[in-house]
Image (cartoon, grey):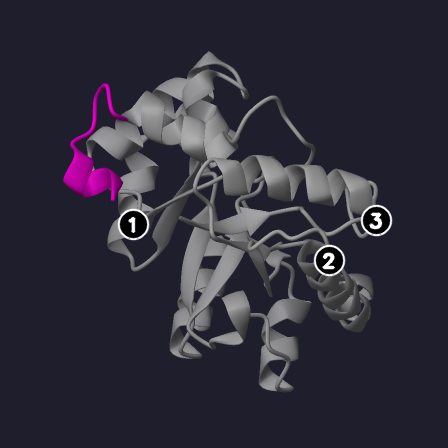
Amino acid sequence: MIDIHSHILPGVDDGSRSVEESLQIARQEESGGTACIISTPHLYDGGDLGRMPLFHHVRQELQEALIQEGLKLKVLQGLEVYPFPGVLEALDNGTDLSLAGQGKHILIDTPFSQFPFDFRTFLFQLRMKGLTPILAHPERAPEFQASPALVQEYAESGCLLQVNAGSLQGKYGPIAANLARDILKRRMAQFVSGDIHRPSRGPVMGRFKDAAASFLDEAYIQ
């Protein structure tokens, strides 16, 4: 499995607090069948744009630590990008904000507050720049929870959807759990990810496969 959304990098955002925590996350997810994790620290504003060299440095150090520990997990570089105006300017200036540096997809942090009035325009402009937006955890966004039909509208507009694995286990409450299940049943999601911030008692992605098997067919899960 490949997890495209995680906060496994130690000490850079609200995710892992130390290298040891990151190693614990790596061990638990590798045990559940995850072979690759894309690290996606938060990019909230222009100040975070200036921290991108730090993100890359920490990722390299973490990958070296994983090798030293005998772990096979590969950690690639990405970002969870909040929709602020400086994003488009950064892209115009040649800053790579794509997942794994492939220049194809950009993970967008779906706001937990009211969507910016120009959110749709922002996403359209990303597509015009050749990037496909992936909306992170739409099931957790209050606007989507209040109007589930909006999820399909955004999907039909060219956005891809990434559901959090923990949503199915009720980690974010019953409303998020129900919406996640609905999105998956309707096959609107292209990705399920851990969005892991801390070590847990078992592999987040591995547990998702077990939970989803009760209501999704194996072909779609794969």
* Local SS, label 1: helix
Which residue is identified by label 2?
Answer: 68
Going by the numbered disc 3, the residue's amino acid type is Gly
Which residue is identified by label 3?
Answer: 11
Dot placed on the residue nearer the N-terminal end, 1 or 2: 2
* Local SS, label 2: helix
Label ID, residue 155:
1
Q: Is there any visible trace of residue 175 in the rendered image?
A: yes
Would you call the spot at circle 3 few (<14 residues within 10 Å), some (14-19), or many (20 or more)?
some
Q: Is 217 covered by the magenta stretch?
A: yes
Would you call the spot at circle 2 few (<14 residues within 10 Å), some (14-19), or many (20 or more)?
few
Dot placed on the residue nearer the N-terminal end, 1 or 3: 3
Q: Quadrant of the C terminus?
A: top left
Would you call the spot at circle 1 few (<14 residues within 10 Å), some (14-19), or many (20 or more)?
some
Q: Quadrant of residue 178?
A: top left
Between the C-alphas of marks 2 and 3, the distance is: 20 Å
Q: Relative to 67, is 209 on the left or the right?
A: left
Q: Which residues are magenta?
A: 213-222
Dot placed on the residue nearer the N-terminal end, 2 or 3: 3
Going by the numbered disc 2, the residue's amino acid type is Gln
Give the residue drawn at x 72%, y 44%: 22
The x and y percentages for residue 93 are: 65, 86
Closest to the camera, between mark 2 and mark 3, is 2
The x and y percentages for residue 119 are: 50, 54
Q: Residues at badges 2 and 3 in contact (C-beta under 8 Å)?
A: no
Q: How many marks?
A: 3
